Image (cartoon, helix red, strand yellow):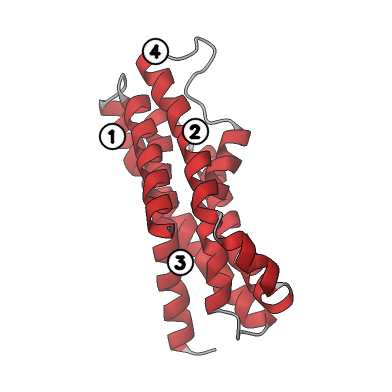
Amino acid sequence: MNLRFFANSILLGAGLAMDAFSVSCANGLKEPDMKVGRMSLIAGMYAWFQFMMPMIGWFCVRKVAEYFVMFQRFIPWIALILLLCIGGKMLLEGICGGDAEDSGTLLLGALVLQAIATSIDALSVGFTIEKYDVVMALTACLLIAVVTYVICMGGLVIGKKVGTKLTGKASILGGVILIAIGIEIFVGGI
């Protein structure tokens, strides 16, 4: 491992984190009163999936490459469907006034779906790190996760600041952002 390895891993992490950053902004918009512990949980969830997906991809390339190649063409579809569902729900809640019980708090199930949808394209990163040994692959994925965490915390802070100013329209804007990210992942993957 050298400086180039660390720089490449950090830059790879920054590139992979952009979808999660945008979704973090949307989550901050939806929940402008979010506490730091909750922000850390959300950013940590994105970081965890950004860590796991390249590791799974790395493992698949080394052990079950032919099965992974068959699955890879479905990745854009899965991300599109997940983000359309989540974004569509937020959009409808914003337009219809939302549920009286829903305080705008992101539920764990929705958070997991967002994390999967924004990190599923990172599976293919396993191809780029295929020649790494286990220690290098784990280190690269850990750096990706740390970068993702930092970037997502920034996204949540930005979303909260903007969300406080847009209180009535935040859910609509957040839903539109998620739908746009889903379409962007789909179009980029096809």
Tell me: residue 4, above or below residue 141. below
Structural distance between the alpha carbons of marks 1 and 2: 20 Å
Q: Residue at x 39, y 12 (%)?
A: 97
In the rendered image, residue 63, in percent from the top left (x then y), is placed at 74, 76
Residue 38 on image: x %, y %: 54, 38
Closest to the camera, between mark 3 and mark 2, is 2
Separation of marks 4 and 1 at Cα, in angstroms? 21 Å
Q: Which residue is mark 4?
A: 96
In this rendering, the label closer to the viewer, 4 or 1: 4
Give amino acid for label 2. Ile
Residue 151 seen anywhere in this rendered image of the structure: yes
For the N terminus, give its image quadrant.
bottom right
Assess disc 4: are there few (<14), some (14-19) or many (≥20) residues with their C-alpha within 10 Å of its C-alpha: few
Position of 67 with respect to 34 (left or right) is right
Disc 1 target residue? 162
Q: Which residue is mark 2?
A: 86
Residue labelled with disc 3 = 13
Residue at the right extreme, as displayed:
63
What secondary structure is marked by label 1?
A: helix
Query: Residue 4 location, x and y as percent?
Result: 43, 87
Give residue 43's mark: none
